[in-house]
Amino acid sequence: MQRKRELYGRQRERALLHALVTDAQAGPVLLLRGDVGTGKTALLDDAVAHARVHRPGTIVLRCAGGEPDAALPFSGLLDLLTPVLDRTERLPDFQRRALTEALGLCPPTAQTGELTVRTALRTLLAALPAPVLLVADDVPDLDPATRAALLFLARRPVPGTAVLLAARTGPERHDLPTLDLTGIDADAARALLDARGVRGAHTAALITAAEGNPLALTELPEPGPAPLPARLRSAFADRARALPEQTRTLLLTAAAESRGATASVLAAARHLKLPATALADAETAGLLDVTGPTLRFRHPLLRSVVYADAPSAERARVHTALALALTGHEALWHRALAATEPDEDLAAALERDADAIAGRGGLTAATTVLTRAAELSPDPAHGTRRFASAAHAAWKSGHPETARALTARTDRGSPELARLEGLIAYSSGDQPGALRQLVRAAETHAAHAPAAAAALLFMACDAAEHAGLDEDLRRTALRITTLDLPPRHHAYGRLLAAGPGAHDDPWAVLDAAPEELGTSRVHRWLWPLAITRDAPDPAPVRDFAERACAEIAAEGVQALLPRPLLWLADLECRTGRIAAAAEHAQEALRCTRDLDQPVARADALALLARIAALHGDPACRTYADEATALALPLRNRAAQAEASWARALLALAQGDTAEAVEHLLPVPGIHSRIARLSAPDLAQARGAVPEAEADAYAADPFARARASLARGEHLRRDRRATAAREHLRQAAALFEGLGLTVWRDRARAELRAAGGTAPTALPHLTSQEHEVARLAAQGLSNREIGARLTMSPRTAGYHLYKLFPKLGITSRAQLRDLNL
């Protein structure tokens, strides 16, 4: 009856949720947001009931947050997935292992990344045989690992799964479809009070005082001057205080247990010597709902009030009882919550436990456990080390604000502090400043931890590249060659100093990796990618980048994932995989929002602007403006220059060469690498006519297509129609393969003007395959094709091997009969 009362005046919201849960095939997502008592939980309950009646067979998965959950990694996810845990056997082996280890269902065998767990969650939901309704209440109070997994899922909807989340109104910002709940109107409020049997002259004052809040209308005995949330908390606290002492202790035990496990609460109650009737008394009082193995507070606020209102000594007594009733990590954490004075043995046990938690993919929970370990450390030196470790875990898991707060609790003389400040600045601060801080941190580690110093210098090089400081980049990279490290490390330093195209084979660079990088699989993949990402033939580097992203994601260091994702997207642009590039750039953008990384977010927006420009999409301007607004205060000159390049490409797509020149002229003064990459566009905007095969960026099929178009346009204007048609036909085919219809139509129009006809579209060939096929049709050997397209003869042969079945042919001779 109580839940029904809270639904008064919510007909519109109920209708919306009913429509969502009965149309789960579209993968709808909705965040309910409102103050305490506005009816979020009641609406979720109503949506679940509606789904069960109107869509029989719906699998309902549900969890809710609780304040003591922070150190229990994926505890909310375990509650959520308990009904379908038997389906995990259908997952790919590595996902099944990651998920079951994260949930604590088996011992960890290796480092598990949170991203792998999140991906496994999506795979599991997609594989379920019936519609799924996923409901999470009080999302901000879920353990951080579960909260991040749910937000990851909500931003990447799964067909067949409806996702309903609920959160209190607060400063957190989410880019999710949101329904804000405000107070109900006066008529609905009067109807609710009437249903309670509350009538009389004071009802008008009560309605005004309740501000339309349904919970206030059902719980507040009379109007009052205090703010509404305070009055609600006070009303619940008064109800709890009026109970017998043993019932209050039972309620406190349930609030502290946080998982809603009836057996655990009863086991702790026995250690507290509470009578068996205490749980029934709490139910009778209407404060707890018990359904077999699970129990829930009648309202989430009640649980919070019961826990916060209890004296600290009573909370410690309850946590001690729970520690005796539970085992493993949960028992240890309750011991930590019960502790009231420093305890090195307990702090050391928590530190070891944090390592195990991180191994299960719970870096965010490890941060909480390490923080408590630091607080319980009698020795200030141990405390500083543990605070620093907690801050590092927070940074790696993508929580820079938490990392900043923890660095403030770290001794100012600690070498770890310099490293942490540099890492935080690298992902979210002024890039020249990040360069200086990272170099300074590297110097503090150079003597006693040279491999760690090299890793910091590597990131300093990336900060220098963002800032457009070429000489600083070179000098920083060469500093690696002076560290007390083996020759392989020094060779990596020299390659970094030479620039991002210093080597053309990332796999060879990986094979030559210094042994010291073996302790960090992330850097083991990042360094070769950074060294080779501008190689003349981007195809093998793209393949390497795809593998690198998978390896880094599996490692769980979320803070470093956006960088290789963006490099992968850029390489896909260069190899003509425009759709894949857009997908990875969007994923990088989502990651930077999840991780609060404005530096990489500016990079992602600038790359998306460039991709939109290739399609002639005006959205380019929006992306470019957002990128520039972020880049300027951070002095991320790479993103600033790329945004200008994108605007120029859009102008070229629209035939406005003057505007293109205007956007491109400042680029050399902003960033040298972007100036080099955009130089062919500036030359063509100024009227230069490059040879199609001699373009400065010839491995890029878009640049090659543009060069062919420009050459064809020039030849047509020079009245050499026959020669023009060959170049224009090639340009149209390349643009077709790239899926760039604006440019394709322009090339076809020029071709018609030259007296030719558009080639037969071969959309099932990639642009690279189309080029290989065209040259093979002309009789060129694999070696000649490779030389022409800047690839190895083996790669050319591989492309032919793949495209023959697509074209329904079996020999090179048959290529001549096709209109390529």
Image (spheres, rainbow, N blue to C red):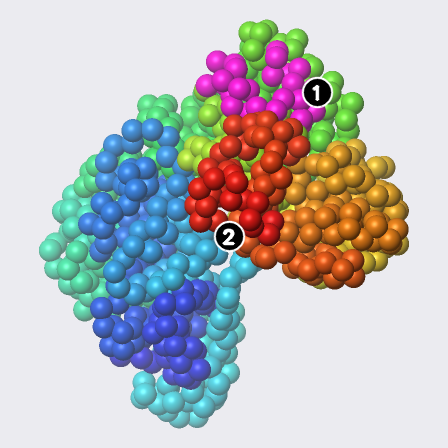
Local secondary structure at mark 2: loop
Question: Mostly what secondary structure, the magenta segment?
Answer: helix
Is residue 505 shown left or right of residue 278? right
Residue 718 visible? The answer is yes
Residue occupying the far left of the picture: 276
Q: The magenta stretch spans which residues? A: 490-518
Q: Is residue 66 above or below residue 785?
A: below
Q: Which residue is mark 1?
A: 498
**Residue nearest the viewer, comparing 288 with 820:** 820
In the visual, does 94 lie left or right of 734?
Answer: left
Where residue 367 appears, x then y in whole percent?
Answer: 44, 36
Which residue sits at x=34%, y=50%?
A: 123
Q: Residue furthest bottom?
A: 200
Residue 207 location in percent, x, y? 46, 84
Q: Do we see residue 68 in this rendering? A: no
Q: CA distance from mark 2 to mark 1?
A: 39 Å
Q: Please, what secondary structure does the residue beneath circle 1 have?
A: helix
Q: Which mark is residue 764?
A: 2
* Residue 206 found in image quarter: bottom left
